[in-house]
Amino acid sequence: MEKVRSLILIKIETIYGSDASPSETTDAIITLGEPTFDIVANAKERNIPLSYFGKIAPVIIGEALKLSFKTELKGSGTAGTAPQCGRLLRIANFTETINAGTSVVYALNSNLEGESATIYFWSGGTRHKLKGCVASIKIPLQAGELMTMDVEITGLYDGSHYSDTTFPTPTFDNILPQPWDNAAFKLDSITDLVISKLDIDLGNEIAKRSDANADTGISRYYVKDRTVKFSFDPEKVALTTFNPYTYHKNQTSFNIETKPNGTAGNKIEIIGSGLVMDSPPKYGNRENVITWELSATARPTLSAGNTELQITFK
């Protein structure tokens, strides 16, 4: 028998799909709970007429390797030094800008050939190599709970992705994640809305580049589009203070931000811009208090884009 244990190492690739050889000493990511690993494959049937019932075995053609996991959203502990989770943001089409000694800013881009990573995933004594990995990310923020990210990885299929490999001894950072409290939530100029949750879904659409010259007929995976969605649950207030019905009816654009307290090197600021409520407001009940259940999509304009979501570590 083999005890349940897992490990993820991730390193940005310099060439798409080329093994970046992540190391257990510098590239380990903390995961919360067990990751989910899946092989996407097509069973190509061979419809050969037979004199008896049944069909002969199909030919299996691998298409992708997928990995899903939860990790901590936190800083590096040093202002101006990129956090480990920044690698995940980069392969989800965020551009990393390092301001030495001050901050690291992650802003969205619209590159079809964005950054990619090699991931080594261990389940017990079996290692899986995922190359050419790109991602989509969700950030579920809950009052008083630790800040985390849900990550969905898609990488190239490789028929030799698995091997018996000794489980390494990883080096993890010792930075503690911050709870989402003292959140300084703001909707435009409104600073006193009482909310218990803020869910952010990057909504990346991952596509494959079909190429007959490539292994399995796929040369890369990439982000082809995205739809960034936000949902939150403010307590109901007077409509003169905040009227979600007019926001929805008029498709009024608004911004939100949250800047929870943190220590130097572990302060996180999240800003959503150009949000519109494309779904009607709904009433909710939180401990016998009326709330609004609101959802919005961050939209580009005719003259500007890549502003839907920005994450800054200070």
Image: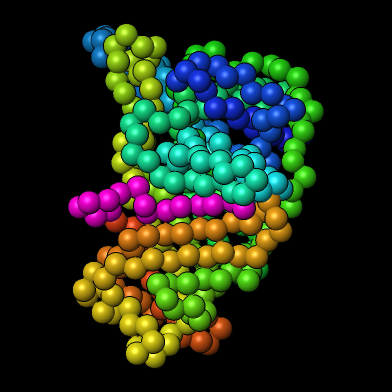
313 falls in the magenta region: yes
Image quarter of residue 184: bottom right
Residue at the image point whose x is 74% and y is 28% from the top: 25
Place of residue 103 in the rendered image (x, y in percent of width and height, measured from the top left): 59, 48
Q: Seen in the image, is 299 located left or right of residue 233?
A: left
Residue at the image point whose x is 27% and y is 51% from the top: 304
Place of residue 130 in the rendered image (x, y in percent of width and height, measured from the top left): 53, 24
How many marks do you count on the picture? 0
Place of residue 246 in the rendered image (x, y in percent of width and height, measured from the top left): 26, 79
Give the camera-side residue of 14 and 123: 14
Question: What range of the chain is rendered magenta?
Answer: 300-314
- Compared to residue 290, the image places residue 60 above or below, namely above
Image quarter of residue 114: top left
Residue at the image point whose x is 52% and y is 71% from the top: 185
Residue at the image point whose x is 40% and y is 72% from the top: 188
Can residue 33 be spotted in the picture? no
Give the camera-side residue of 79 and 237: 79
- Compared to residue 221, the image places residue 189 above or below, namely below
Q: Main secondary structure of the magenta part?
A: loop
7 falls in the magenta region: no
Quarter of the picture containing the N terminus is top right
- Compared to residue 26, the image places residue 239 above or below, namely below
Q: Which colour style is shown?
A: rainbow
Q: Seen in the image, is 247 located left or right of residue 82?
A: left
Place of residue 11 in the rendered image (x, y in percent of width and height, measured from the top left): 59, 27
Can residue 8 be spotted in the picture? yes
Q: Seen in the image, is 243 located left or right of residue 14?
A: left
